[in-house]
Amino acid sequence: IGYGPPSGGAGGRGLGGAQKPQDFTQLPPGVYRPIPLRGILFWNAHVFNLTEGDHMMNGRLNFLYTDDRRYRVRSVPGGGLTTFLPNTPPYEKEEICRTTSVPKGAHLFALSSHTHKRGERFTIFHPDGSLLYENLIYNDPTSAIFDPPLVFDSENESDRTFKYCSVY
């Protein structure tokens, strides 16, 4: 885009964003997400209009500040970006799966999904193989909240490895 990092903000630290028409996220006590005080702000409202007419799209973020900073938010490594690479022929279906591991000591308190228009199903499987999350609506994904958080303390990486899949 002619300025800033070469990635144009992709894959960088997200300041915020909604993956559905109405979104409210409240972090558990002691959990915080740092925000840089200077730099280039990339804003991707990620809104889309599925109607045939023009329509005003609005996005707003409210930030709260805290002194209770015990647990820093970190995204699940690998995210879902590698399932955004469908090469599905027209009128066919394809399931793309990947795995990702969380660091030892990770506390998982929420999951959501993000596929685009052709995404029909998104799933995340617990390291023990059980279904942990499923979403069937690409433009209004459900959120799974874990209270208390799921804790992954095993020395064995396979006990901290999740499988996630998207059907296109």
Image: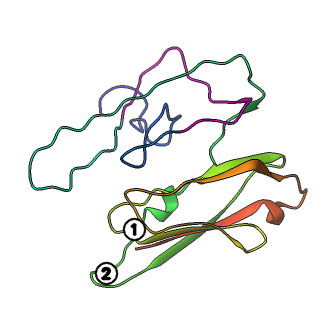
Image location of residue 69, percent across then percent down:
74, 24
Q: Which mark is residue 119?
A: 1
Direction from residue 62 to residue 54 in the image, left or right:
left
Which residue shows up at 74% across the image and 21% down it? Answer: 68
**Residue 139 image-quadrant placement:** bottom left
39 is within the stretch colored magenta: yes
Q: Which residue is mark 2?
A: 89
Going by the numbered disc 2, the residue's amino acid type is Pro
**How many other residues sit within 10 Å of disc 1, few (<14), some (14-19) or many (≥20)?**
many
Quadrant of the frame with the N terminus? top left
User: What is the CA distance from the residue labelled 2 to the residue labelled 1?
Assistant: 14 Å
User: Where is 13 relative to 101, above or below?
Assistant: above
Image location of residue 56, percent across then percent down:
18, 38
From this viewpoint, is residue 77 visible?
no
- Are the residues at dot 2 and dot 1 in contact (C-beta closer than 8 Å)? no
Direction from residue 135 to residue 119 in the image, left or right:
left
Direction from residue 165 to residue 85 in the image, left or right:
left
What element does badge 2 sit on?
Answer: loop
What element does badge 1 sit on?
Answer: loop
Which residue shows up at 42% across the image and 60% down it? Answer: 115
Image location of residue 84, percent across then percent down:
43, 62
Going by the numbered disc 1, the residue's amino acid type is Gly
Pointer 2 or 1: first along the chain: 2
- Residue at the extreme bottom: 92
Q: Which mark is residue 54?
A: none
Magenta stretch bounds: 25-43
